Amino acid sequence: MTEHGADLVIRADAIHTLVPGQAPQRVLAVRGDRIAALSPDPNGLDAWVGPHTTVHDLPGATVLPAFDDTHTHLIYAALGAHDVPVHQARDIPEFLDLIRQRAQATPEGEWIRTTTNWQELNLAERRMPTAAELDTATDRHPVLVKRGGHNDVVNTCALRLAGITEDTPVPPGGVIGRHADGRLDGRLIDNAMGLVERLVPGPDRAQRIDGLRLATAQYAATGIGTVRDCAVSPADYAVLLAAREAGALGIRVRALISALGMTGAAQVEELLDVMEDWRDGADPQLRVWGVKFGLDGGLEAGATEEPYACDHAFSGTLTWEPDALVEAVEAVVRRGWRVGAHAYGDRAVRTLLDVYERVLARNPGLPAGTLVMEHGGLAGPEQCARAVELGIPVTIQQPLLHDTAEVEEGFWGPERVARLFPARGWIDLGAQVSAGSDFPVGQFGAMRSVWGMTTRQTVIGVKGPEHAITYDEAVTLHTVDAARLCGDQDLRGTLTPGRLADLTVWDRDPAHCPSEALRDLNPVRTIVGGRFVGR
């Protein structure tokens, strides 16, 4: 027997290491949090089995590395664990009734929040509720209804507490919604959201830690072992640290500290001062990846070169002046941090590449992967080629397209929606591209994302089939390439001795799973650092 033996041995039909040219293995041994050995012979590691070894014989099973979701919002998922579950509603009356039920059990004057992972077109009325409708659920509590990361709807009580009236100036890069007659409708978009959200007290520390426990288990249950959370406030990161200490983080977290809503380098410098305490990146479970900027809006306000299909006078919103963003990004990279910037529409993509090109020229020698484009939604061939030339990695989110295609067609028209997230073009150009969900806008899940990238299927049918990629390519974007983006390429992404034991076990080979079954396929086990999580 090998000295001390293994803690865990898994025998399976195929263990795909994702090492180029390596045939599938049949048995894998884990010691502590690391892979200790592999063998193509099912009995090739019998010497590693000792009296304290847990052995799983899984005939017919397939083992893959655990997947990364390289652009998601774990914090939102954790907050939503205790919020009003309006994503379950089928129409606005049900939506309002869920809020009404929570109001009946909530002390008067306390804030009521909803989950964020819903789309108005999934409601029978195919629209958002209004402030007046929220008032019918409760006029004794301020209500914050969130949809994704760019849209809020609040009731009159919340508007009153925030001092928002019909005369309130609209913040740059934001929208305060109105009815046709000029009355406020409760809608707040992008930089206007802070007018209300700054007033909303967060849940207590114990609730937040429990939310992270639940949310990380939910991610793990779909095969995700690491998330790159792209909007973490300093207060959020403090909670993540506490959750890590309490053993409540079932998966690994790479946090982007949020500069969303900021418009100048001075604000960013203050944020960077706070981040100085988090420079130690030795913990493989939790670390800060860098800083997150937003350059344009989301579905309703992505900055486009051509006007919107629904409004020929509107081309989306840029939330930063380019010169100011150059200064802010430079402030970050000069302190040794990385930058991920949201650029969704093609005008935003072009503007961000302009900004990044200037930063690279003024700061020669920046490490590869310092500047990252988040989404690059409408990046065309010329912009893709330019990003590759500049060495700018990009993250793409097929589940976002799947869930929002109908919404986006209303704003941009079918031709532009079909061009979103051109994975085939990125890969063929040699781009460093990785994949995720953008939950709560898209639904997270390892194989749900793979299915979407291989089929280009959406809620309204196939969109842009020429941008589809192969199963093997899609898996690589979530494993090998994702680990590289996170700076973990020496720790994770492939299954080789010495690397972290982050694995997924599937009861069938996903590569040979029928398309519709692949969409909802979850692993039977997810292992992070040698520990079973998620189930």
Image (tube, grey):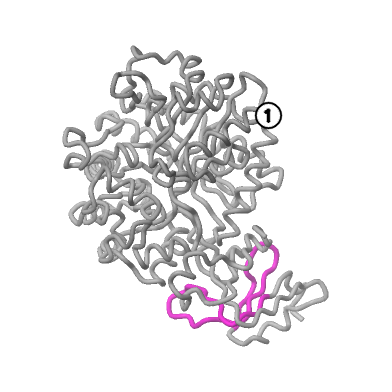
Q: Is residue 278 left or right of residue 335?
A: right
Residue placed farthest to the right in the image?
A: 51
Q: Which residue is mark 1?
A: 105
Above or below residue 235? Residue 453 is below
Q: Position of residue 15 (x, y in %)?
A: 56, 77
Residue at x 46% of width, y 29% of height: 271
The image quadrant of residue 358 is top left
> Can you see residue 289?
no
Q: Is residue 403 left or right of residue 216?
A: left
In this view, the residue in front, 389 or 472, is 472
The image quadrant of residue 152 is top left
In this view, the residue in front, 244 or 59, is 59
| Magenta stretch prevailing secondary structure | strand
Q: Residues within 10 Å of mark 1 (few under 14, many from 20)?
A: few
Q: Position of residue 190 (x, y in %)?
A: 37, 31
Q: Amino acid at mark 1?
A: Ala
Looking at the figure, which quarter contains the C terminus? bottom right
The residues colored magenta run: 10-39
> Can you see residue 507?
yes
Looking at the figure, which quarter contains the N terminus? bottom right
Q: Decide whether residue 188 is among the magenta residues.
A: no
Above or below residue 98? Residue 49 is below
Question: SS class of the residue under badge 1?
Answer: loop
Q: Decide whether residue 12 is among the magenta residues.
A: yes
Residue at x 47% of width, y 44% of height: 118
In this view, the residue in front, 204 or 413, is 413
Q: Position of residue 279 (x, y in %)?
A: 53, 40
